[in-house]
Image: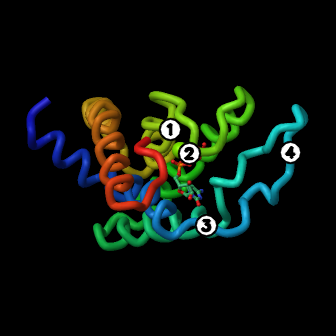
Amino acid sequence: MNTQTVISAIYLFLPAYFANASPVVFGGGPPLDGGVNWLDGKPFLGGHKTTKGTIFGIITGSLIGLLQGNLLGGVLQAVGAISGDIVTSFFKRRINIEPGGSFPVADQLDFILFAVALSYPVQLTSWETNIVIILVTLPLHYLTNVAAYLLGLKKKPW
Ligand code: CTP
Ligand code: MG
């Protein structure tokens, strides 16, 4: 895994990163799940997944893809990143983790796993690129969240 491979993998997946990060800045307001509960009586997704954050995330990620000349890949990455994060919230609520509570590894990797999978049919990324971006996302996601926390954008550093 050389530096060049790592940098180009991060560059290729910037739409996923932007899609995942922008709801922290632009999110808020009414919950995406409309405040409904699942069959277990607990929130379906919880109040931290908002309609505004979801829409802004998809738009921001797609715009980055457009700027990179990879609109379709960017849209698929953005939709994948946002969906992966939503799927994790669904499972967090099932196992009684409050909105904003930590679910290690899933919290860090959900968005990138879904972004890699959804964009694969268009981007045809190599196994090396896929593995590299997943591996670097673990520390990188953690560091970006600590930065967002220090900037006062997030209440918790994860
Ligand atoms: N956010 C949003 N809409 C989304 C995703 C995120 O509005 N679809 C915003 C919320 O303000 C959320 C913040 O981005 O608090 C950070 O997202 P994330 O860390 O994924 O959510 P958590 O606060 O950890 O909530 P959960 O426990 O449901 O994962
Ligand atoms: Mg999350």
Ligand 1 neighbours mark 3 (CB distance < 8 Å) = yes
For marks 4 and 1, give the CA distance.
22 Å
Amino acid carrying mark 1 in the image: Asp
Of the numbered discs in the image, which one, if any, rests on residue 154?
Answer: none
Amino acid carrying mark 2 in the image: Asp
Q: Which residue is drawn at 36% across and 56% down?
A: 148
Quickly name the residue at label 2. 85
Of the numbered discs in the image, which one, if any, rests on residue 37?
Answer: 4
**Residue 16 x, y percent position in the rendering:** 41, 53
Q: Is mark 1 on a helix, strand or loop?
A: helix
Ligand 1 neighbours mark 4 (CB distance < 8 Å) = no
- Residue 92 sits in which quadrant? top right
Q: What element carries label 3?
A: loop
Ligand 2 neighbours mark 1 (CB distance < 8 Å) = yes
Q: Quarter holding the N terminus? A: top left
Q: Residue at x 72, y 48 (%)?
A: 46
For marks 3 and 2, give the CA distance.
16 Å
For marks 4 and 3, give the CA distance.
19 Å
